[in-house]
Amino acid sequence: MSFILDFFNKFLGQAPLLLGTVVFLGYLLLGRKWYDAAAGFIKTYVGFRILQVGTGGLVATFRPIIVAVYDRFGVSAFVIDPYYGQTSAMQVLDSVNSLQYVGYVMIIAFIVNIALVAFKKYTKLRALFLTGHIMYQQSAVLLWALYWVITGATGAEVGWFLVIVTGLLMGVYWSVASNLVVEATQDVTGGAGFSVGHQQMFGAWIAYKLGAKIGNREKDVNDLNLPGWLSVLNDNIVANVVIMTAFVGTLMVVIGPDNFNYDTNRYYWGTFIFETTSLFAVYITIILTGVRMFVAELTNSFQGISDKLLPNTVPAVDCAVTFGFSPNAPAYGFIFGFLGQMIGITTLILIQSPILIIAGFIALFFDNGTLAVFANKSGGRRAAAIIPFFSGIIQVLGSALVLTVLRDAGPNVIGWMGMFDWATVWTGVTLLTSVLGIVVPIILIPLFLIIPQLQYKRHKQNYFTTMIDDSVAVDPSALK
Amino acid sequence: MLKVLAACGNGMGSSQIIKMRIEQVLKELGLDFKVDHCSIGEAKGMSRNYDLVLVSQQFVKDFPASNDKTKIVGLINLLSATEIKEKVSLALSL
């Protein structure tokens, strides 16, 4: 017995070893050779450790800036970008020896999703969430948020009950939210047979429904010619440096050189600012490299298992897969979302909020870009401008709100997701849980499951047939 | 061996999907291959070392035109094995 307990602590209690084991077993289950499975284990382990180098470096880079802003203005500055949220979650959970539970949350949620789709006759759920990096990220952030508002600064390990509740709620969200946008995604993609499994499914659904009311779908944003410099945004490394230099650089200039420790013999003030702000891109790139490596293995394993268990299910994939069907909309979403976020940030400053938000590249581009794709499909360019604009305001204010409770989780907190569903639904869940306790996530599990039943009632005849076989290719000439 | 690179905005989700689909297609075509994936920003510098670069259609203009060594293929539906097979066969003149 003590051997088993020891194994749970010293082997499966180590996050990278646990995930490596999941991949290893997944590959064996799929009938891969043992050396392939062993290679998968190693790459998962190494990838995860690379990710941890990145999260540690990102906190170390951002921490002095948070401190300097706090000393100067008495406000806490945070970045709204999923990798900053993930970094905060992983660092906080690791500090209470609980990082491995993120893996369990993700596995429970994945099993819940499979089970709900397997019983689609009753559950009316059609889509399987397969976006590996998001699955890990959301499991980490939700576990952190619920742990913190329930347990607080006790330093206690995350308990199994919370792990199971978080896993169930996560799995139900993946199933329900990606199922909600099946029809809208079919319209956007001309029936490409997939759904979105990302961070803004509720947002995309609202954008699609609201777009039809406020715009004209004939005036498509893809009929416009956008300026060429916008293609710079396609380069994520350049975009990260430019955005961080603009925001954090401005903050540093306002705070002034006297509040930073740097070697004036080696640096101009300007080059010191650039070196600091570009470090964000350095660590984000390290994080992405690590996540890419371990998620590639995890996704292969997960997708292999789900293909065997549930052939012909609608895959719910990364939001950016829709961008190919509406190439101008993401840039449109970025510009108007940016304006919205600026108004949100200005509002925070004017009302003297204790939280200052720094915009991040991913929420700006991918989140508002996706909302613009869906809004444009039903309401054309007018909808693709108005909806991301308001989404930008909501992303800032919603994230600031949730950070008022989460910032107390200590010096490891550097940001929050900022993506639409996380600035609305999950902000609400976190705040309600902080008041009412774990009963909130428990009640939400059956409540979420009502949504697909309502969807089914509205179009019973073709509810299950709107899913088109994914082997049907879209004729590219029809999209021109 | 055919060296293939799949790329997307952040090099996370979409390129992973392209990677899984192209592996399926190349296996069907009976070719010997290796597929990597990364972001567009990284791919711009690395594309010369690959025989085939697969990206979403809107990113094709970010790359130098296809040449004898490197073929750039733009995709609309990243999940469609049919579309990938058609376009890749054309690019590799199979």
Image: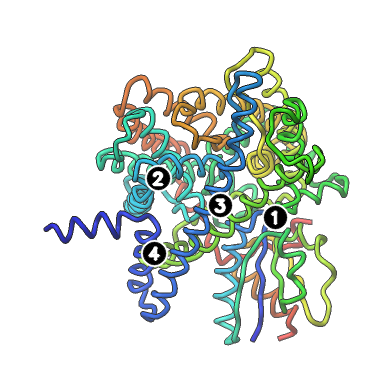
A70 or A345: nearer the viewer: A70
Residue placed most toward the observer, A98 or A327? A98
- Mark 4 vs mark 3, foreground winner is 3
- Residues A89 and A183: in front is A89
Question: Which callout, 4 or 2, points at the residue further toward the start of the chain?
Answer: 4
Q: Is residue B30 above or below residue A147?
A: below
According to the picture, the residue beneath numbered tag 2 turns out to be A94
Give how far apart the Cα atoms at labels 1 and 3 are. 30 Å
Left or right: A177, with A336 as reference point: left
Nearer the N terminus, badge 1 or badge 3?
3
Q: Residue furthest left?
A: A1
Tell me what residue is drawn at x 40 percent, y 23 percent.
A432
Q: Quickly name the residue at label 3.
A: A54
Cα distance between the residues tagged 4 and 2: 18 Å
Tell me the distance, in whole angstroms, between the alpha carbons under discs 4 and 3.
Answer: 19 Å
| Vertical arrangement, residue A7 with respect to residue B23, above or below | above
* Callout 4 and callout 3 share a chain: yes
Which subunit holds the residue at mark 1? A
Point out residue A377 in the picture as x, y percentages from the top left corner. Answer: 69, 42
Q: Earlier in the sequence, mark 2 or mark 1?
A: 2
- For residue A396, above or below residue A371: above
Give the spatial CA distance, label 4 vs label 1: 33 Å
Q: Which of the two discs, 4 and 3, labels the residue nearer the N terminus?
A: 4
Pointer 4: residues within 10 angstroms few (<14), some, or many (20+)? many
Task: Identify the mark at residue A324; answer none if there is no mark.
Answer: 1
